[in-house]
Amino acid sequence: MAKGKSTFASWYCKDCNTQKKTTAYNKKNNDKIAKELSMFCKNCRKHVDFKRKDTKKGN
Ligand SMILES: [Zn+2]
C-alpha cells in the first residue's frame, strides 16, 4: 500500500485565468490525463478550456 507521489494539478480558465479546482493524480497515469479540459467557468459564464498546471505538494 505505497501511497505517495501524487501530483496535484490545478485547472485554470484560459479566458480569465481563474483557478477552478485542484485534482490529485498519480504520475504514472499522467499520460491519461488531459492537458486541457472544457469546463464551465462561473466567472465567464460559459464553457471554456481549462489549462492544467501541475503543482507538487510537500518537500
Ligand atoms: Zn473564465
Image (cartoon, rainbow, N blue to C red):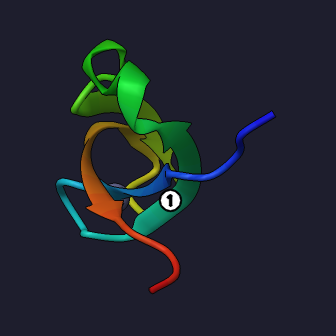
Q: For residue 34, which quarter of the picture? A: top left
Q: Residue 17: x percent and y percent?
A: 25, 69
Q: In the figure, is residue 57 to the left or right of 44?
A: right
Percent coordinates x, y for residue 42 in the rendering: 54, 57
Residue found 39% across the figure and 69% down from its top? 56
Q: Quadrant of the N terminus?
A: top right
Viewer-side residue, 9 vs 1: 1
Dot 1 beta carbon under 8 Å from ligand 1: no
Q: Residue 8 in the image: state x and y as whole percent.
A: 47, 57
Which residue occupies the extreme front position in the image?
Answer: 1
Dot 1 surroundings within 10 Å: few (below 14), some, or many (20 or more)? some
The outermost residue toward the right is 1
Q: Quadrant of ligand 1?
A: bottom left
Front residue (pair 12, 9): 9
Q: Residue at x 32, y 27 (%)?
A: 30
User: Outermost residue, top direction?
Assistant: 32
Q: Secondary structure at mark 1?
A: strand
In the displayed structure image, the side of residue 17 where residue 6 appears, left or right: right
Judge by depth and name the residue closer to the eye, 39 or 2: 2
Residue at (57% x, 48% y) in the render = 24
Quadrant location of the C terminus in the rendered image? bottom left
Name above or below for residue 33 compared with residue 8: above
Left/right placement of residue 30 relative to residue 6 reads left
- Identify which residue, 46 or 57, lies in the foreground: 57
Q: Could you tell me residue 4's position as x and y percent?
A: 62, 52
| Residue at horizontal 37 percent and vertical 70 percent from the top | 18
Q: How many marks?
A: 1
**Which residue is label 1 attached to?**
20
Q: Is residue 55 above or below residue 47?
A: below
The amino acid pointed to by label 1 is: Lys
Where 36 sits versus 58, above or below? above
